[in-house]
Image (cartoon, helix red, strand yellow):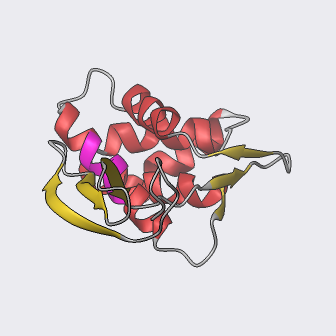
Amino acid sequence: MKCPYCGSERSKVVDKRETEEGAATRRRRECLECEKRYTTYEKIETVILTVRKKSGEIQAFDRNKLKTGIMKACEKRPISAGQIDDIVSDIIFHLRNKESTEITSALIGRLVMTRLKKLDKVAYIRFASVYKDFKDPEEFQDVVSKVK
């Protein structure tokens, strides 16, 4: 760590604390050359996920977009916001543990459907109707009969 005042790389840590959110470590340092103090922060570098859409387009992963899609499927169902947050967090955890940082929208859709199927059959069918892009009532009926 270089001193912002003199550029020396020799310093000592005089105080160390976690931030309130626990997302970073704050270190108060003292330069061993000029004896001035300065603060540094250390935080975990997060992996940036990208999503390959069906069209081939690549977008940055958006947690809010995932949550909104799940919320629409769960609208007017006995599902709490906490349960939806748990699904979103679980899916993101699964995606971050993949070897690749590029994921497909199809994978995300399958993960959502798997979790909704266990949680609420109606929400599952709603999500499946959009995700699978049903063209006629027979496709819808097939999914409903499989859920029964």
Q: Residue at x 40, y 57 (%)?
A: 91
* Residue 74 makes an appearance in the image: yes
* Residue 72 sits inside the magenta stretch: no
Of the 4 image quadrants, the one containing the N terminus is bottom left
Q: Quadrant of residue 83?
A: top left
Left or right of 106 on screen, residue 129: left
Q: Residue at x 52, y 33 (%)?
A: 65
From the viewer's side, name the closer residue of 3 and 136.
3
Q: Quadrant of residue 80?
A: top left
| Number of numbered labels in the structure image | 0
Residue at the limit of the structure toward the top, as seen here: 76
| Spot occupied by residue 20 in the image (x, y as percentages of width and height) | 14, 42
Left or right of 30 on screen, residue 33: right
Residue at the limit of the structure toward the bottom, as seen here: 99
* Residue 86 sits inside the magenta stretch: yes
* Residue 79 makes an appearance in the image: no
| Spot occupied by residue 116 in the image (x, y as percentages of width and height) | 35, 49
Q: Quadrant of residue 62?
A: top right
From the viewer's side, name the closer residue of 50 and 91.
50
Q: Residue at x 32, y 66 (%)?
A: 32
Q: Residue at x 16, y 53 (%)?
A: 18
From the viewer's side, name the closer residue of 22 and 64.
22
Left or right of 96 on screen, residue 14: left
Q: Magenta span covers which residues? A: 85-90
Residue at the limit of the structure toward the right, as seen here: 56
| Spot occupied by residue 89 in the image (x, y as percentages of width and height) | 33, 52
Q: Magenta: predominant secondary structure element?
A: helix
| Spot occupied by residue 59 in the image (x, y as percentages of width and height) | 72, 43
From the viewer's side, name the closer residue of 124 and 50.
50
